Image: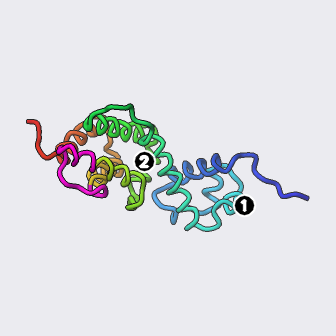
Amino acid sequence: MAKRRSPRSIAVIEDRLLRAAVSLGDTLDAISMPELAKAADIAVGTLYRIAPSKAALAELLDMRAWACFETYVFAPFPARLSLQERFSLMWARLGDFAAAEPEISTFLARLPMRSDHAFVKASTIFARDGQATGTFKTLTGAELAALVWGPVSALLRNRACSVESLHHLETAVWDALCRTHNI
């Protein structure tokens, strides 16, 4: 007799696990695997087949959450945008992500951003472009990513992310990046 497999795709199951995990609490330590499986509406065996341990589950959830982030933030940019227009578009996309996926964005706000993360790599290119035009101070990609993600993630962690607070932060971060400020 063949093993019974879930009719859902792995991606759908992983997404359900992510959404269930972030809705159940701040850490996986506080959630049992059976509790998570029930919240995700999957069989416990399916959960263990996809993530045989909490460490594997944590890695999977981190990967899926960052993939969700990247879908919003890294959609193609229109050609010929100025540096400030590119910054404003990326900032708007961060706000869109926070508004559309509040639990996932808050989950990500508690995670460290690794130096090999796509956001840091994109920030490196953006910092290079800003320095080449003389617009930005000398910053590494990691520093630029921290200047952007740090304040946004603090708002998310404190559940204080609003359109107004994001607008104020956008202006403050842009000013922090630039060599000179428009007064």
Q: Earlier in the sequence, mark 1 or mark 2?
A: 1
Q: Evaluate if marks 1 and 2 touch, with contact meaning CB atoms under 8 Å apart.
A: no
Picture coordinates of residue 128 (x, y %)?
27, 50
Q: Secondary structure at mark 2?
A: helix
How far is the residue under mark 1 from the one under mark 2? 28 Å
Residue 96 drawn above or below residue 151: above
Type of amino acid under label 1: Gly
The colour scheme used here is: rainbow
The residue to which callout 2 is attached is: 105
Q: Residue at (50%, 57%) from the top-left corner?
A: 62
Q: Secondary structure at mark 1?
A: helix
The magenta span reads 128-143
Outermost residue toward the front in this view: 132
Type of amino acid under label 2: Ser
The residue to which callout 1 is attached is: 45
* Image position of 119 (left or right of 170): right
